């Protein structure tokens, strides 16, 4: 069974932009390999080895992105029925007055430093299905309790 990747439209566009940039690099790396091959003995040719390694990394990433895009499901803006779902942006207020905001996204798009957390992450799992006014405990160091103040 193929894994379905949940992405926002912005996340999918970003992946497609990265894929196009990587595809544009193919001719450059092929040219580097050709020039390095022309230098002679491949067994002791550092330029050739480096170019081949770069090509392998490039092709791996291209393959990975093509697989994700082919199996992507775009997260639609959730209806605001008051519960946290994939695609929701959640505002939290801590007991100490600290405010936090998270957007619930799929694993491919997760970037905790930007406030985008996966629905499969520990924090994402705690938030999924909760409603405005619910108290949630986020198991971090130290344990923090937050109240959900809004969901959009």
Image: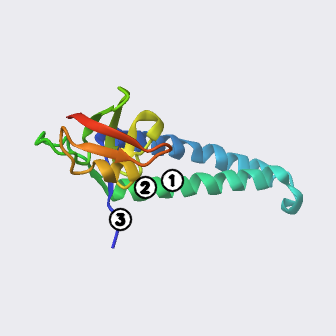
Disc 2, disc 1: CB below 8 Å? yes
Q: Quadrant of the N terminus?
A: bottom left
Q: In the orientation shown, which residue stands out farthest toward the front?
A: 95
Residue at 70 percent of width and 55 percent of height: 53
- Mark found first going from the N terminus, 1 or 3: 3
Q: Nearer the viewer, residue 95 or 19?
A: 95
Model colouring: rainbow
**Residue 62: mark in rendering:** 1
Q: Which of marks 3 and 2 precedes in the sequence?
A: 3
- Which percent across, then down, holds residue 61? 54, 53
- Residue 9 higher or lower than 56, as above or below: above
Percent coordinates x, y for residue 133 in the rendering: 19, 38
Q: Residue furthest bottom?
A: 1
Q: Would residue 125 appear left or right of 41 to someone viewing this image? A: left
Q: From where the camera sits, is residue 118 visible?
A: no
* Residue, disc 3: 3
Q: Quadrant of the C terminus?
A: top left
Q: Nearer the viewer, residue 17 or 5?
A: 5
Residue appearing at x 20%, y 44% in the figure:
76
Which mark is nearer the camera, 1 or 3?
3
CA–CA distance between discs 2 and 1?
A: 6 Å
Contact, mark 1 vs mark 3 (Cβ under 8 Å): no
Q: Is residue 23 visible?
A: yes
Image spot of residue 48 (x, y percent):
78, 53
Separation (CA) of disc 1 from disc 3: 18 Å
**Dot 3 lies on which element?**
loop
Residue annotated with mark 2: 66
């Amino acid at each position: 069974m193929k894994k379905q990747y949940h992405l926002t439209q912005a996340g999918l566009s970003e992946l497609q932009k990265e894929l196009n940039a990587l595809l544009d690099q193919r001719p450059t790396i092929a040219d580097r390999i050709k020039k390095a091959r022309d230098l002679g003995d491949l067994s002791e040719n550092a330029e050739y080895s480096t170019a081949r390694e770069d090509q392998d990394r490039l092709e791996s990433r291209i393959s990975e992105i093509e697989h994700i895009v082919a199996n992507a499901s775009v997260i639609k803006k959730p209806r605001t029925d008051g519960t946290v779902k994939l695609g929701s942006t959640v505002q939290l207020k801590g007991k100490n007055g600290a405010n936090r905001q998270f957007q619930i996204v799929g694993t491919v798009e997760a970037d905790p430093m930007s406030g985008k957390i996966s629905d499969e992450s520990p924090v994402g799992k705690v938030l999924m299905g909760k409603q405005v006014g619910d108290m949630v405990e986020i198991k971090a160091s130290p344990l923090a309790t937050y109240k959900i103040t809004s969901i959009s």
